[in-house]
Amino acid sequence: MSAANNNTIDIKKSFVDAILAGLISLIVFGPIVGVVLQGYSFNMEPMRVAWLVGIVMVGRFFLSLFLQTEKGLSVLQGFERPGSGVHVLPPDYKSRLRWVIPLVIVLAIIFPFMANKYVLTVVILGLIYVLLGLGLNIVVGLAGLLDLGYVAFYAIGAYGMALGYHYLGLGFWTVLPLAAVAAGLAGCILGFPVLRMHGDYLAIVTLGFGEIIRLILNNWLSFTGGPNGMPVPSPTFMGLEFGRRAKEGGVPFHEFFGLDYNPDLKFIFIYTVLFLVVLAVLYIKHRLTRMPVGRAWEALREDEIACRAMGLNHVLVKLSAFTLGASTAGLAGVFFASYQGFVNPSSFTFFESALILAIVVLGGMGSTVGVVIAAFVLTVAPELLRSFSEYRVLLFGILMVLMMIWRPRGLIRISRTGVTPRKGVAP
């Protein structure tokens, strides 16, 4: 601090920082970038590693020099400012969302008529992950229950669609509520054994639950098809199919309404229904967070002992979080199965749970708007970075590290509108 105040810069310290950063980058990049697998053999690429280590060292050197200046010190102080918890807004604060939400709805209505099939499918995938993020945000962001097996409820919804059609002849509209109920029951069943668990122990049990579901789907060949998966029928609108020709002599959608055939009608329909479901889930979650159950979730997250001391039933609070979060994942699973037209266990690995958890963490624990933004960023960005497919996971890790340094509470932290105290009441 004194050196910076005297306008002197410690170059030796910058060199030491650069060398340490180079050693760390060598450990990180060496096995990932320096070894290229080719069948059963491998080739060494020392020049790629040298370039990356050199870039990191040079960048760290100049960053260290900058942080010793007055402007750099002011930047460091910005990271150390207090108030990282819930942000309280003035009582008369008017949110900008009252203008943004109608605009987003208008753009969403126009979008399917202007987008091609590829862009439409990417946005559908983004909306599916919005649903998943909103569901896990209830469990992790609001209730503070670390769930690493959340993908199991996603699989229950998707396979509920496939199995319901294959064995019972159920369609999209019948399975949609049933899958939400089935996934919610599974979440409730999972909630009972973990009532007394916290932190790492809870994460391990939920991770095991997710793997159990995946292995059952993978190994029960006679019922689920095993690794071969199962086909899923396209959704229908009041019995009208979206293909060029309807099955068994029926009337397809475009002929019934006198429209030209559009091969993207199926995806436009899925997008429309999915967008309406996302809006409904957003509204329900918004209302729940302002109801006693939402306050109970947040109290449980902050301090379970204090929560129980205040007379709140922690059993019901935990089970309600697991059930509602799981039912949302069940809805997302039905849309995923209908969108893809096929399901198999490889779509429901631990990496999916980690991705959904990253959406919640990056968006902001408990923040609805942040989760929506993060879901689109983490699902659309990989599609835009297909030319960098070798480095997508590396870029994803760098993004996580930068976010934890820059915005440890996520993109958008929780905010609450303050209340004006009544007259005669002590502040």
Image: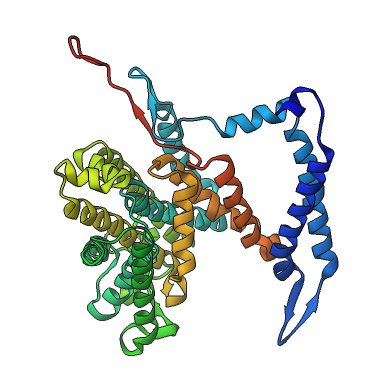
In front: 308, or 226? Answer: 308
Instruction: Look at the image and name its color scheme.
Output: rainbow
State which quarter of the image contains the N terminus: top right
Query: Would you say 128 lies left or right of 205 here?
Result: right
Q: Position of residue 212 (x, y in %)?
A: 35, 77
Which quarter of the picture shows residue 31?
bottom right
Query: Would you say 40 lies left or right of 61 here?
Result: left
Q: Position of residue 207 (x, y in %)?
A: 38, 68
The image shows residue 43, relative to residue 261, as above or below, that is below
Q: Position of residue 285 (x, y in %)?
A: 29, 43
- Which residue is painted at 79% across and 58% down in the image? 52
In front: 323, or 365? Answer: 365
Task: Report how many numbered discs are placed on residues in the image.
Answer: 0
The image shows residue 180, relative to residue 220, as above or below, that is above
- Which residue is painted at 30% across and 49% down in the image? 143
Does residue 252 appear in the picture of this structure? no
Residue at the far bottom in the pictured view: 222
- Which residue is painted at 43% across and 40% down in the image? 369
The image shows residue 407, relative to residue 158, as above or below, that is above
Does residue 144 appear in the picture of this structure? yes
Q: Position of residue 88 (x, y in %)?
A: 37, 26
State which quarter of the image contains the C terminus: top left
